[in-house]
Amino acid sequence: MSASTGRTARAWRSLRADRAAVAGLAVVSGVVALGALTFLDAALFDRGLIAAVYYDPTSPAFAPLQPPSPAHPFGTDTLGRDVLARVLYGAKVSVRVAVTAVTVAAVVGSLVGVLAGYSGGAVETVAMRAVDVLLGFPALVLAIGVVAALGFSLTNVIVALGIVYIPQFARIARSSALAESEQAYVDAARVQGYSRRHIVLREVLPNALSPLLVQASLLMAFAIIAEASLSFLGLGVQPPTPSWGGMVSTGADYLTTAPWISLFPGLMIFVTVLAFNLLGDGLRDALDPRESPERRF
């Protein structure tokens, strides 16, 4: 326990020393907080939080195609809806998709990978061949196929992306489990008579979390891009619910006359994805033992 605590403390100090990772963490925290507020807005306000303090993101209450101005900092879209209000509300969609899909994939994929790596034999063969089948399809193509089969909705987008990202976690968890299974603490647990379930869940999995955590932070960025791509193609969140990808798609025909419709949601996608990648790189450097001060000299 003390060794694990020491590694965690060193990792945290290393992460704080990485300015890019800290900046990424700040942006990610802001987007997640915004998404959480808009996700809970129905319970706090009858018309929603953004509509209560600013403008309704779904109400065409203004003149269409107004350029950015003090009244509408991001302008208005083709129907006269405030773009800033829609961009803020779109964070709810991106955060919900990224967090939920990656969490589902991480839980399922990690359990499958750890069990396969620790058990070996037929269990490993069947599990990893199923993973290989999923990896045989391009991620976005597989997600489009799943959404097309299930129907066009936000829930089905989350399910599709969860399925797509399971193999990523399963392969990493299997590799980590194979390495951890050779450690002395696993042999000690076997000698003491602990069950396979206890060893997998209480011994092997906690010690394999570092690479899985890094992978989760990186896949958050890919999930946001995938959701935006599906919404751009009309397969994700359906109008009038705002989503960053859908807004970029809506403004695609007005890039020369009203570029702000696509510019600002596209910029939010770029900044959020960059922040998740910076955070993931920082976590990887902080949690990689080869990057610790003891290994550098």
Image (tube, grey):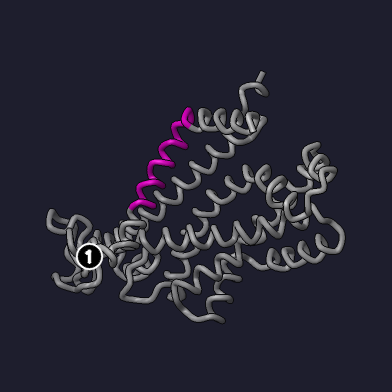
* Residue that numbered label 1 is attached to: 45
Residue range highlighted in magenta: 16-33
Residue at the extreme front: 192
**Where is residue 6, by image quadrant?**
top right
Q: What is the total number of numbered labels drawn onto the structure image?
A: 1
Would residue 132 be counted in the magenta stretch?
no
Crowdedness near tag 1: few (<14), some (14–19) or many (≥20) residues, C-alpha within 10 Å: few
| Quadrant placement of the N terminus | top right
Q: Which amino acid does label 1 sit on?
A: Phe
Relative to 205, residue 63 above or below = below
Relative to 173, residue 94 above or below = below
Residue 147 in picture, x, y percent from top left? 53, 76
| Quadrant placement of the C terminus | top right
Of 22 and 68, nearer the camera is 22
Residue at 84% from the left image edge and 56% from the top image edge:
120
Residue 154 in picture, x, y percent from top left? 44, 72
- Decide if residue 224 is on the left or right side of residue 297: left
- Decide if residue 69 is on the left or right side of residue 120: left
